[in-house]
Image: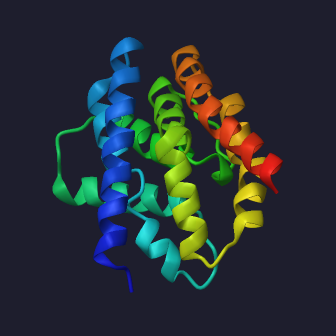
């Protein structure tokens, strides 16, 4: 069962992604309503993902749950905006294999990846590894296979600039840990 601490960390992640997405969205003249809704709901399927007997990407589950939620609420959102919200959520995780086709989807994808970089990203990665009984080699492996490549997966120039700064923190840690081994 999910602990309260996991829920709080999930909330903090959503809040950070929301804030970064809005920052980038304002600078990029994005549709902020779409971005706000998509950012708030982008990980709503995380809890269900852990319970699925067959692995289903959390972005797919989140998109399905968000669509149902928004339809059930009968919020006055036009069909194109609703499609964009669902697409943005579905495409935010590169492991889902769906390319972000709209500006809002690109922003959400970048904002989510940016949260995995920098000092907070380092904290999250090490905490996740420890929680899952991983050791230092698991941290190094995750850095090499995923985290250190994130800056090259950004879609927008503004995101690339933010990623470059946050990447430096991760890379310095990586170099130092490898040197000390």
The residue positioned farthest toward the front in the image shown: 180
59 left or right of 32 in image:
right
Where does the image place residue 3, in percent across and percent down from the top left?
34, 79
160 left or right of 79 in image:
right
Where does the image place residue 110, in percent across and percent down from the top left?
53, 33
How many marks are shown on the rendered structure?
A: 0
Where does the image place residue 87, in percent across and percent down from the top left?
49, 42
Q: At 82% across and 46% down in the image, what residue appears?
A: 179
Residue 57 in sight? yes
| Residue nearest the viewer, comparing 151 with 98 | 151
| Residue nearest the viewer, comparing 38 with 19 | 19
Split into 4 quadrants, where in the image is the N terminus?
bottom left
Q: At 43% across and 65% down in the image, what residue appears?
A: 45
Q: At 53% across and 44% down in the image, what residue appears?
A: 92
| Residue nearest the viewer, comparing 144 with 159 | 144
| Residue nearest the viewer, comparing 41 with 81 | 41
Compared with 152, 134 (above or below) is below
Compared with 175, 48 (above or below) is below
Where does the image place residue 25, in percent across and percent down from the top left?
37, 22
Toward which corner of the image does residue 72 lie, by quadrant? bottom left
């Amino acid at each position: 069962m999910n602990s309260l601490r996991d829920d709080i960390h999930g909330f903090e992640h959503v809040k950070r992604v929301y804030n970064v997405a809005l920052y980038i969205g304002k600078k990029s003249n994005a549709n902020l309503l779409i971005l706000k809704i998509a950012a708030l709901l982008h990980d709503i399927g995380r809890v269900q993902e852990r319970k699925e007997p067959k692995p289903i990407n959390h972005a797919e589950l989140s998109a399905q749950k968000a669509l149902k939620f928004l339809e059930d609420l009968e919020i006055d959102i036009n069909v194109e905006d609703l499609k964009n919200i669902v697409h943005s959520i579905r495409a935010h995780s590169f492991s889902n294999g769906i390319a972000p086709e709209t500006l809002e989807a690109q922003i959400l994808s970048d904002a989510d990846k940016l949260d995995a970089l920098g000092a907070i990203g380092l904290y999250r990665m090490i905490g996740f590894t420890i929680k899952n009984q991983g050791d230092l080699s698991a941290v190094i492996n995750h850095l090499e296979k995923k985290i250190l490549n994130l800056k090259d997966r950004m879609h927008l120039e503004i995101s690339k600039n933010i990623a470059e700064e946050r990447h430096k923190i991760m890379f310095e840690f990586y170099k130092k840990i490898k040197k000390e081994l």
